[in-house]
Amino acid sequence: MATKRTPLRRDIKRWISPAAIDAFKAGDRMGLYHALALKPWQPNPLEVDGPEPPEWGSGTAWVADWPMMWEIRQDLEAACK
C-alpha cells in the first residue's frame, strides 16, 4: 500500500512572515523565535553568520540545524531589501 510522505525538508519560505521580517530588522531575538516558531535548541538566524557552524558548536544540537538557519537568514536578508 502506497503512502503519502511529507518531505523532511519543508518549504522554508513559508516561515518568512511580515512579523519575522520586522523582528529581524529590529534585532529582536525573542520576536524572531516566536515568528519563526523555532525550538529552544535551534540557533537564532540573527546569530548565524556563515554557512558553516562554529568550531565551538561541535557536538551540540546547533550543528544539525545550522544550514537551515543559514538559509532562513539569507531569505530574511533578501526580504529586507
Image: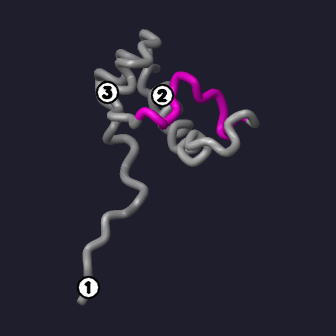
Residue that mark 2 sits on: 78
Q: Residue at x 40, y 44 (%)?
A: 12
- 33 lies above or below 29: below
- Near-viewer residue (76 or 61): 61
Amino acid at the residue labelled 1: Ala
Magenta stretch: dominant secondary structure: loop
Left or right of residue 53: residue 42:
left
Quadrant of res 38: top left
Give the numbered dot on residue 2. Answer: 1
Name the residue at the right extreme. Answer: 55
Give me the residue at 31% from left, 27% from top: 35
Residue 64 is tagged as none
Residue interval drawn in magenta:
40-54
Task: State how far apart marks 3 and 2 are (Cα).
Answer: 17 Å
| Residue 78 vertical placement versus 39 (above, below) | above
Q: Position of residue 63 (x, y in %)?
A: 61, 44
* Kind of residue at disc 2: Ala
Q: Is residue 48 above or below residue 24?
A: below
In terms of image quadrants, where is residue 15?
Answer: top left
Q: How far, Cα to Cα, is label 1 from label 2?
A: 39 Å
In this figure, which residue is indicated by the disc labeled 3?
35
In the rendered structure, which disc, 3 or 2, sits on the residue that comes first in sequence? Answer: 3
Membership of 43 in magenta stretch: yes
Label 1: which secondary element: loop
Whether the magenta-drawn stretch holds residue 71 is answered as no
**Label 2 element class:** helix
